[in-house]
Image (cartoon, grey):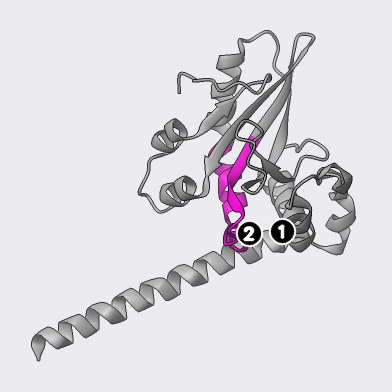
Amino acid sequence: MCRRRNILAAQIQIALFLFATCGLTSEREQAVLSYSTERNMVKYADLLVEEERYTTAGLKYQKKYHRHLIGIAGEIVENRKLEIEKHSIGFYYDKRSGDTRSLYLGLDIDAGSRGGKPFERIAVELIRSDLANIMQTIHACRSVFNEGDIAGMVIGWKWTAGAAREHLSVWITKADFIRYEDDLLTFDGMLQRSTITNTRGRVIRLPL
């Protein structure tokens, strides 16, 4: 009898934990969606990928989750104080793999002018200062990542260095950023498992 009571108590604790977790997730998603006001629908419309540029099911998901994308824009601009590149929030596929069915929710940050610093140094600085906060905002939209076609997120930065326009992207799988958020993977461990590409779209390794 005592053993049964212990098992029942454990089951109740697990149920309460799952209930609390679901509540927290819902609360975070609603916080992002709170930025999708009528005013912001107009204000941030030009931050979303232009519909005619899509050649994949990304267009379907952009229409379905339009409020989420506007919410992401508002939260990052107004709360994170970062500038988002125009026409960059949307759904991408990894051209290196050619798999157009696996989509990544992503955006590019306009990192401004970075002087004459080496690419690798700027890349590390941006990843260390911005990535965790942007991930937290995007991953709050759990409804999007419940879709089977959504494989992860891709976060990029664009900046000016001298006369050149540079671009850095970090491709993170859904499994890895969920494990990171659940404290099953460290931030550095997650980065090591992610794919990082440079301006030319080539995979690079950084001294992170």
What is the quadrant of the C terminus in the image? top left
Rendering coords of residue 141 (x, y %): 62, 58
Amino acid type at mark 1: His
Q: Secondary structure at mark 1?
A: helix
The total of numbered circles placed on residues is: 2
Determine the residue located farthest toward the front in the rendered image: 98
| Above or below 114: residue 129 | below
Q: Are marks 2 and 1 in contact (CB under 8 Å)?
A: yes
Which residue is drawn at the image coordinates 73% and 60% (left, top)? 65
Q: Is residue 132 magenta?
A: yes
On the image, numbered disc 2 is attached to which residue? 144
Q: Place residue 53 in its image quadrant.
A: top right
Relative placement, left or right, of 206 versus 39 is left
Q: Position of residue 185 (x, y in %)?
A: 37, 44
Position above or below: 24 against 137: below
Q: Is residue 205 visible?
A: yes
Specify which label sits upstream in the sequence, 2 or 1: 1
In whole angstroms, how far apart are the C-alphas of marks 2 and 1? 8 Å
Q: Quick check: is 19 in the magenta stretch?
A: no
Left or right: residue 176 compared with residue 9 = right
| Within-10-Å neighbours for mark 2: few <14, some 14–19, many 20+ | many
For the magenta stretch, what is the residue range? Answer: 131-155
- Counting from the top left corner in percent of width and height, residue 156 is at 66, 33
Give me the disc on residue 68. 1
